Amino acid sequence: MYKVIGNTQTRAFRVLWMLEELGQPYEHVNAPPRDPAVVAVNPAGKVPVLVVDGVPITDSLAIMTYLADRHAGLAFAPGTIDRAHQDALTQLVHEEFDQLLWMAARHSFVLPEEHRVPAIKDSLKWEFEQSQHHLLPRMSETGPFLMGATMTIADILLAHCLRWAVAAKFPIVDDRLHDFGAMMFDRPAYARAAAA
């Protein structure tokens, strides 16, 4: 059984959601960053951590890719053109959505107060809007997922970022993204992960 360490207000939620989608059992340790339970397996104190056979794996995207490949689900086969497109979408969402939201969080409450630059959030919100315009032409027209009929880790990553954006008051500028988020948040596996 997997052990997931990290609370659901963090990127650990993505891992829990993915495990629910894959139908894999897990133990959840609901610990915040830098908690002793986290530091014991990740000296950096960052979450999530997935413990597999006593071995910790860190970074939500690395964990998600590992789970997808191990269970042959939520991903196209490595070495295929579809996988290359999936990985490109995943990287786009990670670099142009997740990282902007994380930078805003750092300047809101993560960094020591004397190192925060609250004014940076205006430019991050503008950049977040531009990132949506980069993504929209790459979304499948047939849906319901980013790549059409097949759900991948890119879908979970994007949906989590959209939820995070709403909480952070970042603009979501297109109805397609609102509809995508609503569809993803209506999934039973999402509800089970949220209840963890």
Image (spheres, rainbow, N blue to C red):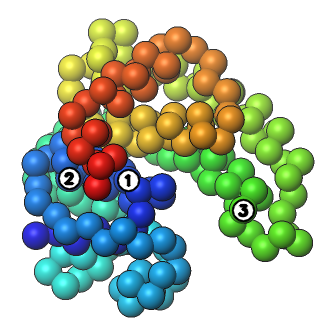
Q: Please determine whether, in this image, residue 63 is positioned above or below residue 145.
A: below
Q: Mark 3 points at which residue?
A: 109
Report the residue at 28% width, 39% height from top. 191
Quadrant in which the C terminus is drawn: bottom left
Query: Tags 3 and 1 in contact by the CB under 8 Å rule?
Result: no
Marks 2 and 1 sit apart, C-alpha to C-alpha, by 10 Å
Q: What element carries label 3?
A: helix
Q: Mark 1 points at which residue?
A: 13
Few, some or many residues within 10 Å of mark 1 (<14, 14–19, 20+): many
Figure disc tally: 3
Q: Which amino acid does label 1 sit on?
A: Phe
Can residue 64 be seen from the camera position used here? no
Q: Mark 2 points at which residue?
A: 19
13 horizontally vs 70: left or right: right
Can residue 6 be seen from the camera position used here? yes
Which of the numbered marks, if any, corresponds to residue 136?
none
Give the x, y percent position of residue 70.
13, 58
